[in-house]
Image (tube, rainbow, N blue to C red):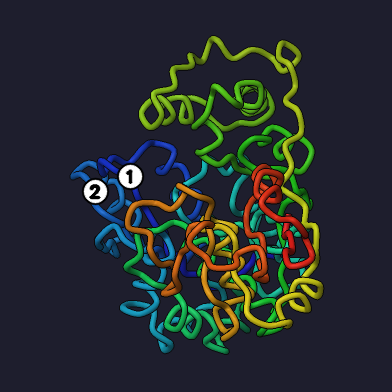
Amino acid sequence: MENTKKRVCIFSFFERTGYVNDYVIVLLKELSFVTDRLIIVVNGTIDIRGKNIFYGFTDEIYIRKNMGYDAGAYKYALREILKKEELDKYDEIIFCNDTFFGPFCSWKEIFEKMEHVTCDFWGLNGFFHVVFAHIQSYFLVFRKGIIQMQLLHRYFQENIDETTTEINDIYCQFETGLFDFLSREAGMRYAMYAMECNCDVYRYSYAYLKDYHLPIVKKKTFSKPEEDWDNICCTLSYIKYETTYDVNLILDSIRRIYGLEIQYEEIRTIDSYRLPEIVEVPSQMNNDEQIEQFLSGGDFYIYGAGMYASKAYWRYARNNYHFQGFIVSQGRRKSGQDSLFGHPVYEWTELENALEQRILLGVGKDYVSDIMQNFKSTSNLLRIF
């Protein structure tokens, strides 16, 4: 039976020079087969060629300042274009950006599979063994229940800073924040297209393609060839020999974006390469209940000022009056970073009686051992990872 759902897609585009790579054309062409309306929001700039390409898909092209990342683009569209009365006309709304290559099968096939899955929103992959569980936000689909309850308008209006230039703000406000709001607070059911996998989607993209059937590859997969060469080679080989996707679209783009020169003829069959080792997302040391119990004991700080610390603040501290600020190691405070989310950022030696403070360690596992050496006792410190 042919699917009759009416869909609108907000497509967020950013490219520093305003150039539209050819892989984006393929992505939009595929999207046009499953959507009734396409809204393109450009963050920053777009050249004449790119604008003409986009006009081949839609006459709704909006250019805004490069702030707020893709979340800022989505908020702009929800606030200025798809107000409640407009959005109510649709059965599903899609958020999609240009940070990935693919899909390696049709969007129609993907939507047909997900049509049989009971959920209120879905994406292509996610992480669920860490404290900060979420579906990755480069492609999200929200169904009628979320639209009718105005949950997107409500969340974006109250929580998304469309003027930020800090990527950590978007990680906590949008990617994990929106997921947490919909699933934990609003009770919305979620699903993923790919099989569940807690490997690093960038550094282990080959396994995501082969074993977990993720139909895309993130662009950042190709950003660090000196670290991830085995994975890059296996990924390109799989796409060339196991899919119908034109791998030249990837080669042309990574040459332009990252300066990475790989010729089509150089890509050999998979048995010519060493398979990449598994790279997993850090697993948690303590669960939500343990963290919340620890923080209920009084005033506390979060150690760190990066992605994990920002997510820890968003989940556990932003509505907690016991939160006193962030701590970073000596010499690790960035220039001008005296505050984060309106709370002070202290260097370790600036905090009086630092060893006696209650601290949530919001850093990745690679940094834990060095930080732990500062503590005579660990009873007043709790690790996330």
Q: Considering depth in this image, is 182 or 296 the residue closer to the camera?
A: 296
Q: Considering depth in this image, is 78 or 257 the residue closer to the camera?
A: 257
x 24%, y 48%: residue:
46
The picture places residue 26, in percent across and down from the top left corner, at: 45, 42
List the residue tagged with mark 2. 46
On screen, 123 above or below 211?
below
The picture places residue 294, in percent across and down from the top left corner, at: 76, 75
Foreground tag (2 vs 1): 1
Q: Is residue 321 left or right of residue 51?
A: right
On screen, 177 above or below 208?
below
Mark 2 or mark 1, earlier in chain: 1
Q: Considering depth in this image, is 140 or 28 the residue closer to the camera?
A: 140
Label 1, secondary structure: give it.
Answer: loop
The picture places residue 86, in percent across and down from the top left corner, at: 40, 83
User: Which quarter of the rendered picture does the N terminus lie within?
Assistant: bottom right
Label 2, secondary structure: give it.
Answer: loop
The picture places residue 21, in percent across and down from the top left corner, at: 36, 37
Q: Is residue 335 left or right of residue 101?
A: left
For mark 2, does the 10 Å Cα neighbourhood hold few (<14), some (14 to 19), or many (20 or more) residues? many
Residue 15 numbered mark, or none: 1
x 48%, y 61%: residue:
350
The residue type indicated by label 1 comes to Glu
